[in-house]
Image (cartoon, rainbow, N blue to C red):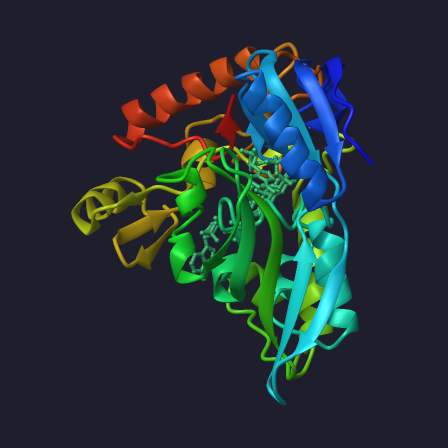
Amino acid sequence: MPIKPRQKVSLQALNTLAVPATAEYFVEINSNEQLAEALIWANERRLPVLPLGGGSNLILQQDFPGLCIHMLNKGIEFLPVDDDWLDVRAQAGENWHDFVRTCLDHQAYGLENLALIPGTVGAAPIQNIGAYGVEVKDYLYQLEAMNCETGELIRFSNADCQFAYRESVFKSALLDQFIVTAVTFRLKTQAQPHYEYAGLAQALEQVSEPDAEDVFRAVVALRSAKLPDPRQVANVGSFFKNPVISPDHFAQLKAQYPNIVGYADKQGIKVAAGWLIDQAGWKGFQAEAVGVHDRQALVLVNPGHAKGREVLDLAHRIQADIREKFAILLDIEPRIY
Ligand code: FAD
Ligand code: NAP
């Protein structure tokens, strides 16, 4: 089917922060051929492109002046490797949580800690999604992505993606240059569940030898209890990354705040940003339309469907306060447009 971009399309229902914004042009993509056609269409008109999945990790602070490409390409293939490993290749437009569930149904293990993360398979490598001690980089084998200028399909190995904490090459050196079309995960045929995170370990205390299904269920229950469902209260999950500070800086803060939450990291000490925001008194804060979630201070909420700029104003106030109180600059996690 040839593509038919539409003009002046509202993105409010397509971003989980529910901010009102429109795309000058908008198109839905179901295949690589359609994607290539859409890129030619945008390039001929010298328009910027915005690849859109579930809209759960972006902040639209103004209307998008180019072509928004909604990735809806579907399909999952199971490709046996050997007795221990199974490759699972999914098209970018697959829903992430449903994909995790499908993997478990096919005895392909490893992604269960990442259950209930909103969004699509194609966006998962962009910020190397992570939760409860597992990141996409731990299981991603390779991905395919289309060059936005040439339309060429390129294969990226795990190393090519340059994954780091909530980072990849697609957020840095190759920003806006590729659109992920499919991702292949190399998953285990025998489950080796991880449940070291305190909350998860506690939730599984009563279960002797938890298996992958137990971990999946516990993660779903924990997240459902603690995080606002974007279909009910608009949000983009964690608004800030957890900052990594030097051991000396952490020791100074610990002397002043004995309960501060921090974990040793390769680069220093990773501090729980949610704890800092809570300690600074922002948890449950509500302005007119925007606020801070009352069960997880790292999540900003937008129940009044305010504009992106208003949400960012609150984020900037929080950043300034945390800088003043703890000498830490919080980085905003979602992509701002
Ligand atoms: P979108 O928001 O549509 O896009 C995000 C960015 O990726 C944009 O820059 C977009 O242009 C780009 N992009 C999207 N698709 C493609 C593609 N195919 N190719 C190239 N670029 C693309 N994140 C975590 O890491 N861990 C969590 O535990 C977690 N929990 C969350 C909980 C809630 C309640 C919410 C609302 C969000 C949470 N997130 C979490 C953030 C978010 O769900 C993830 O980052 C997710 O991968 C975003 O997917 P998406 O399809 O919605 O991406
Ligand atoms: P939590 O369990 O209350 O922990 C608070 C913070 O401490 C987390 O951010 C986590 O860092 C860190 N942490 C906890 N135990 C750790 C351990 N054993 N080793 C190293 N670090 C540890 O967190 P939560 O808010 O309920 O979230 C649970 C998980 O879901 C976390 O992994 C979180 O990242 C993820 N999540 C992410 C988003 C998002 O939008 N990015 C939204 C909701 C939840 P890490 O964040 O580095 O794991």
Is residue 254 among the parts visible in the rendering? yes
Q: Nearer the viewer, residue 152 or 141?
A: 152
Residue 282 in picture, x, y percent from top left: 50, 26
Is residue 204 among the parts visible in the rendering? no
The residue sitting at the right extreme is 1
Q: Nearer the viewer, residue 297 or 47?
A: 47
Identify the residue at horizontal 58%, vertical 35% (top origin): 57
Relative placement, left or right, of 29 versus 295 is right
Question: What is the quadrant of the N terminus in the image?
Answer: top right
Residue 252 in picture, x, y percent from top left: 20, 43
- Note whether 108 is above or below 246 in the view shown: below
- Note whether 263 is above or below 14 in the view shown: below
Q: Nearer the viewer, residue 254 or 188?
A: 188
Number of disc labels: 0
Relative placement, left or right, of 95 versus 149 is right
Q: Quadrant of residue 201?
A: bottom right
Residue 68 in picture, x, y percent from top left: 65, 25
The residue sitting at the left extreme is 248
Q: Nearer the viewer, residue 248 or 162?
A: 162
- Note whether 323 is above or below 222 in the view shown: above
Relative placement, left or right, of 106 versus 110 is right
Residue 268 in picture, x, y percent from top left: 25, 53
- Note whether 232 is above or below 337 in the view shown: below
Identify the residue at horizontal 59%, vertical 17% (top origin): 66
Identify the residue at horizontal 43%, vertical 22% (top origin): 318
